Amino acid sequence: MKRLFLFAALGLLSHLPAAGADTLSCRILKDNNWAFYGTESPTVKVSLGNGRKITEQYNIKCEIRDFLGSPLYDIAQTGSVAPLDSAQLSFTFKALQPGFYNVMLYNHGRFLNRVNLAKEPEKCPNALQMHLKERGATEDFMYLANTVALQRRDLRPQFAIIKDKQLSGKEKNVYRFSMVSRGNERVTGYFAAPKEKKEHPMIITLVPLEERSANPLADFTAPFESAEMVIYLKQRGYNDDVVKNLLTDMLLAMDFAFTREEIRKTQVYIQGKGFAAACAMVSSAMDDRIAGAFMESPNVSLLTASYSMESITNHIKAPLLLGTGLQKDTYSLQEIFSLFNSINAPKEYFVIPDSHEIPRSRWKYVRDTFILRIQE
């Protein structure tokens, strides 16, 4: 398994003014210690700025919490910053085990800034698995997956595509797409394919309906020479029905893709973002025709809320790419990597340290490079 952290030039994560009457600004300097390995100790480097013409006193507390929000360390430093000057502080602590840590900074009890740190994400322990079981996540995912597959066979295929002349261009035809899914729900999207008469690789892109772009072309991210299908997924129903409906939508979209003559059947990939990424992750456990799956900023809570981790990960076969930002909820990060690390299929991860999400252009580059590697 490869790992890749992107570090831009040293700079600042954010520049947040202090709350209340605090007149010191606080910035956290970007540093390679945001992601650390082996025996390294993480260090948070802080710059305090005093824009006033009088000396300012500070009492900075650095609070480190684990992914469950449990406090691990409180480190304090006191001092002063001269008028129109700045002070550089460093806070170093010893991580107990691989995983994700949240660092909060306070001055005189008032919040200043925060940053997440990661220690060896590819070694996140199974402690989360025990925590999930205590919450009741013990059901067998494959039992649900097999139920969905059987019910899908009872659905009469109802696909409709209409060419969109406004969206089509010189090189590609774009079609409006709709299908009838579980519960007689109509699911919509778009299908695009190069006009060149030959077989093309294809990416099925699952997009949460609430994140649908105003311009449909903005939701297409496949390489120019590839076909792409964009499906808008909506969470509907209650309890298990939510997962069953989403997985059925995905499987029906895959069924449609494999009927197209312009598609190279050995190179059909699937990607998703948010909760749709969880669907993409398990796609090869439900259909072995998938050549690879890509998870962008995933939210896997729909799966981990009910199903045991081993029943989710043991059946995933296709190469898997995970991309996320480090500055999101640490519990979510721990959850994602605990699942990811348990998967035995070929896999890689890519993390942007100073962001919640990966910029679209960067994600496309990483994904397309990954596709080239797994095709070799």
Image (cartoon, helix red, strand yellow):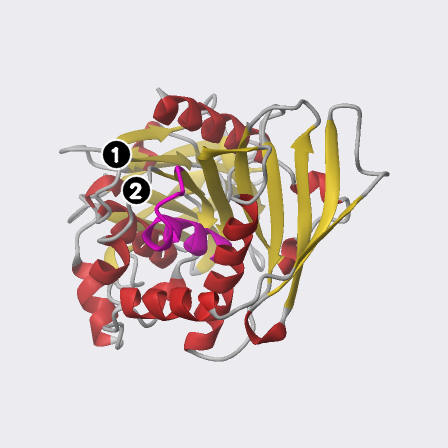
Depth order, front residue of 258/325? 258
Residue under label 1? 36
Residue 321 spot, x, y in % from top left: 38, 38
Asked whether, in this view, residue 261 is left or right of residue 270, the answer is right
Q: Quadrant of the N terminus?
A: top left
Residue at left offset 17%, top offset 66%? 130
**For the residues marked 1 and 2, what is the alpha-carbon distance in whole angstroms?**
7 Å
Quadrant housing residue 84 = top right
Asked whether, in this view, residue 18 is left or right of residue 247, the answer is right
Query: At numbered mark 1, what does the secondary structure look like: helix, strand or loop?
Result: strand
Magenta extent: 275-291
Residue 156 spot, x, y in % from top left: 57, 66
Asked whether residue 280 is drawn in magenta, I would say yes
**Three-letter code, disc 2:** Ala
**Three-letter code, disc 1:** Phe
- Relative to 9, residue 289 above or below: below
Q: Main secondary structure of the magenta part?
A: helix
